[in-house]
Image: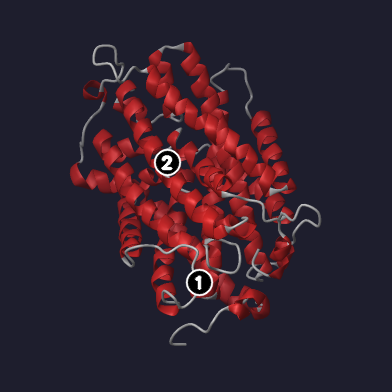
Amino acid sequence: MGNSNESHSLNVLGPLHIWALGVGIVLVGQFMGWNFTIVKGGSLGAILACWIIGVMYISLIMINTEMGAVIPAAGGQYGMAKHFLGPLAAFNIGLMMVFQYVMLEAADALVIGEILATLHPDIQPLPYIIFSLLLLTFLNYRGLHSTLNLNIVLTAISFAAIIILLFSTKFYSPTKSMIDLGKMTNGLPYGWIGILGALQFGCWFYLGIEGTALAADECKSKERALPVGAIAGIFTLIIGATITWYVSSGLVQADELSTSVYPLFDAAKATKIMPVIYILFIGTVLSCLASANGCIADASRAWASMAEDTLIPEVFGALHPKYKTPYRAILFLFPISLAFGFTGLLDEVITFSIISALLAYVLTAIMMIKFRKMYPLNYINRGYVSPWHPIPSVIVLLLSLATIGGMYFGYNINIISAVVFYLLASVWFVMHRSKYLNYNSFISVEDSNWPRPKGY
C-alpha cells in the first residue's frame, strides 16, 4: 500500500473495474438515504441539493484524479496527504476515510435488514446480513480483481432496476404517466436555508466515488483507468440520481418519502406492478451488497496504508503472501462496521460518514492547491491534468464548508462529536503514536525518483 511491499500487488484493474468500484459503492445512496434531503429542504430543495453537490463531486473527481494518478503509492487521499501535507494530516485523512467507508458499510447492513424484514414478520434478518458481509469479506480477502468483477455485475443490475422503474411509470406518455410531481411534491418549504440544510444528504447520492483512487496501484495503467473510470462513474451517478428523485418524488407523497428507509422500493410499491416491485427489491439488496463490497475494499486499503507507513501499528499492514490483499485490515474492520450497522440509527450513521468525508474533502482541496505549487505543470509527468485550476479546488472547499454549516440545522451535536473525536485522535497521535513513526517507511522508496519540490 504505502511502501515497497505494494510493488508485489497485482496490477490487473482497468477503467471498468474503477467505474464498478466508484459507482458500486455509491449507487446504494440512490436506493436509500438521499430522501432525508426532503426533511431539510423539501422536494425542490432535494433536487437542487443533488445538482449542487454533483458539481462539487465533479470538481473533487478532477483534483482527486490528477493527484491520484501521479503519487507513487496507493492510499487515495491518504496517500496524497502523506506526500503533500505531512504525518498528522495524513493520519487524520486516513482515519476519516476509514470511518467514512465503515459507516457506509454499516448503513448498507442496516438497510438490508430493514428490507428483508418486509418479506415476513417472522424473518430474522441478522443471519442473512452476517452471512452476506462475511461472503464479501472473504471475496476481498481473496483479491480485489474478483471483488470488482462481482461489483460490475451487482452495480449493472442495480442501475438497470432504476431504469426499469422509470419506464414502468410510462413517464413519456402525457395521458398514461404515473408520475405526478404537482400532487406528490412539497416545493421549497424552508426557502434557501432549506437548500443549505439539504446539501448534507445530497452528498449521499455520490459519497465514496472519490475512493476510486484507492485502487490506483492495482491498475494496469492508472493514468488511463483512473480518469476514465472515475469520470464515467460520476456522470453515471448524476443521471441515476436525477432519475431517482424524479420517479420517487412523482410516486410517493413527500412526507412519506422523507422518512422512508428504502425510498426506491416504496416508489416501486406505488406502481402496484408486481414484477417491478420484485426487481426493485432485488436491486435494493444488490446495491447494498455492491456498496458494502466496495467499502470493504476501500476502508481496508486506507487502514493498511496507514499501518505500512507506521501511523498505526504495523501489524495491520501485512499483505497476504498469496492473494496480495491487506487481509488483516479486512478482518479487523469487519466487526466494527457490523456493530455500527445494528445500532438502528440510519440517519446518525449516515451523518457520521458524511461529516468524515467532508472534512477530508476540505483537506483535499488544500492539498491540490499546495500540489500545484510544489509540482507545477511540466515539472513532473502527469497522467491527467485537472482543468481550470484552482476553480475546482475552490468549489470543493466552499461547498464542503457550506454543507458542514448546513448540517448544524438538526445535527449540530453530530458535528461537535465528530470534530472532538478527530481532535482527540490527533492528540493521541502527537502525544503517543508519533514516537513510533518510522520516517523511512512513511516516505516511500519510490519518492527518490521525484524531483525536489519547486521552492523547497
Image quadrant holding the N terminus, namely bottom right
Would residue 46 be seen by someone viewing this image from the given angle? yes
The span from disc 2 to disc 1 (Cα, nearest Å) is 30 Å
Tags 2 and 1 touching, CB below 8 Å: no
Label 1 sits on what residue type? Asn
For the view shown, which residue lies furthest in the bottom direction?
456
Nearer the observer, 225 or 400: 225
Q: Is residue 267 above or below residue 159?
A: above
Dot 2 or dot 1, earlier in sequence: 2
Number of disc labels = 2
Horizontal and vertical percent position of residue 127? 68, 30
Horizontal and vertical percent position of residue 451? 54, 82
Colour setting: secondary structure
**Could you tell whether 73 is left or right of 284 in the image?**
right
The kind of secondary structure element at disc 2 is helix
Crowdedness of circle 2 by 10 Å Cα count: few (<14), some, many (20+)? Answer: many
Q: Which residue is mark 2?
A: 237
Mark number, residue 133: none
Nearer the observer, 214 or 436: 214
Would residue 444 be seen by someone viewing this image from the given angle? no
The residue lying at 59 percent from left, 55 percent from top is: 215
Identify the image quadrant of residue 259: top left
Label 2 sits on what residue type? Leu
Q: Which residue is mark 1?
A: 381
Horizontal and vertical percent position of residue 165? 42, 22
The kind of secondary structure element at disc 1 is loop
